[in-house]
Image (cartoon, coloured by chain):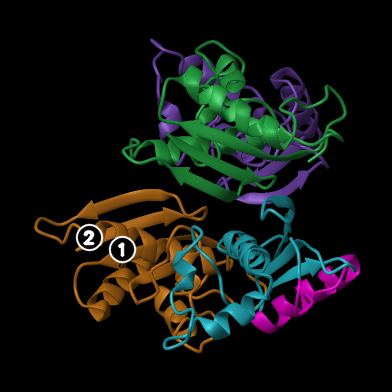
Chain colours: A orange, B cyan, C purple, D green
Amino acid sequence: MCIAVLDSGGILKAFARMDDAWLGSVDVAIKKAKTACFFGMTSGQIGELSQPGGPLYGIEHSNDGLISFPGGIPVVDEDGVLIGAVGVSGSTVENDHQVAKAAVESIGVTDLPEHPWRT
Amino acid sequence: MCIAVLDSGGILKAFARMDDAWLGSVDVAIKKAKTACFFGMTSGQIGELSQPGGPLYGIEHSNDGLISFPGGIPVVDEDGVLIGAVGVSGSTVENDHQVAKAAVESIGVTDLPEHPWRT
Amino acid sequence: MCIAVLDSGGILKAFARMDDAWLGSVDVAIKKAKTACFFGMTSGQIGELSQPGGPLYGIEHSNDGLISFPGGIPVVDEDGVLIGAVGVSGSTVENDHQVAKAAVESIGVTDLPEHPWRT
Amino acid sequence: MCIAVLDSGGILKAFARMDDAWLGSVDVAIKKAKTACFFGMTSGQIGELSQPGGPLYGIEHSNDGLISFPGGIPVVDEDGVLIGAVGVSGSTVENDHQVAKAAVESIGVTDLPEHPWRT
């Protein structure tokens, strides 16, 4: 499993790779976090919107590549400000999401207010 | 919301990002405009052609990445010449398209003539 | 001449290109600002450190490309916090630097405190 | 020898590779032409300015890579408008430059007026 922590500008703040984790998960974890940070929602929510026929179909081609399955979650402070994101990759996507959720909840909250929210 | 204006060569001419817009919308707005400029149609029209099973499925992988949902519109002058494109990202794709349309109509027209059209 | 304004995360906030400016200056202006933002000093200062034999020789290969000649300046607020950067390209490097300096001084200050400084 | 012809937006218009030319020259020829187009001067002139200690040291890192040795020449029409560029690679740089010069002179002129010039 790989865990990436990004700041509010989408830049890497911390990263850890467990022994024997897939090498390909390094980039996937970072891109999941970037996806969550860049659009203020979980990577899985982007994935729901980017299915064939969906309103954001193909958005993964932007920003040097997004990852749109679960495992990336924004980190929001108590004032509703997006302060970063966590991305996890290397297990099932359900596990990845749970690990990211646990990480985020130890720092802040995971949901942006409906409106307004701030970066 | 982010608004990008490109010239007829697909190169950035002007850009503005509203406060608290998604960071990921910077690149999406630019790529929507590029998509419209490079193929002489709206980014949404490319999206209709690039669905699974469609004739242009996967075209987003070309030209360092395209964005194929609405919000990118070509700018055409009164002689039918493609002179640039506008791309908008950051709200619903319907809103993005309307804002791009308003911008383009203030400069020129949005539809290329059937044949011939010129760049 | 092209003028790019980035936020503290190095992401584009605003951009303008004058008519007949070199097309190549679009990217140079953005990368000068990115260089200033990413390292908290002017792009020219990075250039002094990255000459052959210098301590940062070759740093331009990092971060998807830096530009290390004058024209990129960090924007610092009165508390010594780096809040963004301005990059200018399209004239002599001396002119580029002067224009960037004028832009930055209208927003904040251009020098980070020796220690500590914060992003 | 490889010969690339770009339009005024820096986009490929024509290309030919002689049998047995170096494969690496494909990209070099295109980038020489892009360099000439993007900055309105020969690729060799950029090279003089981008030496260590020079005012544009390191500019090759911009625009997804420039090539700054001779062989790229802008194409200018009789009104002083930059209409494209030719890039040649695969022989000595002197030969590359001569071939590009012959190509450009068959289309237009190679020198931009001092001021003003237009794209």
Q: Residue at x 57, y 29 (%)?
A: D100
Q: Give the image location of residue A33, x and y in percent.
A: 39, 63
The main secondary structure of the magenta stretch is: helix
Q: Is residue A30 magenta?
A: no
Q: Is residue D89 left or right of residue D44?
A: left
Q: Give the image location of residue B111, x and y in percent.
A: 79, 77
User: What residue span does the magenta drawing correspond to?
Assistant: B93-116
Q: Chain of mark 1?
A: A
- Checking the image for residue A82, the label placed there is none
User: Is any part of residue B1 visible from this angle?
Assistant: no
Callout 2 amino acid: Gly
- Pointer 1: residues within 10 angstroms few (<14), some, or many (20+)? many
Q: Residue at x 31, y 38 (%)?
A: D20
Q: Give the image location of residue A66, x and y in percent.
A: 42, 66
Compared with C71, B82 (above or below) is below
Q: Which residue is mark 1?
A: A28
Q: Give the image location of residue D12, x and y in percent.
A: 57, 49
Q: Residue at x 47, y 20 (%)?
A: D93
- Contact, mark 1 vs mark 2 (Cβ under 8 Å): yes
Q: Chain of mark 2?
A: A
- Quadrant assignment, res D17: top left
Q: Quadrant of the C terminus of chain A?
A: bottom right
Q: Which residue is mark 2?
A: A24
Same subunit, tags 1 and 2: yes
Q: Is residue B64 left or right of residue D118?
A: left
Q: Nearer the viewer, residue B18 or D61?
A: D61
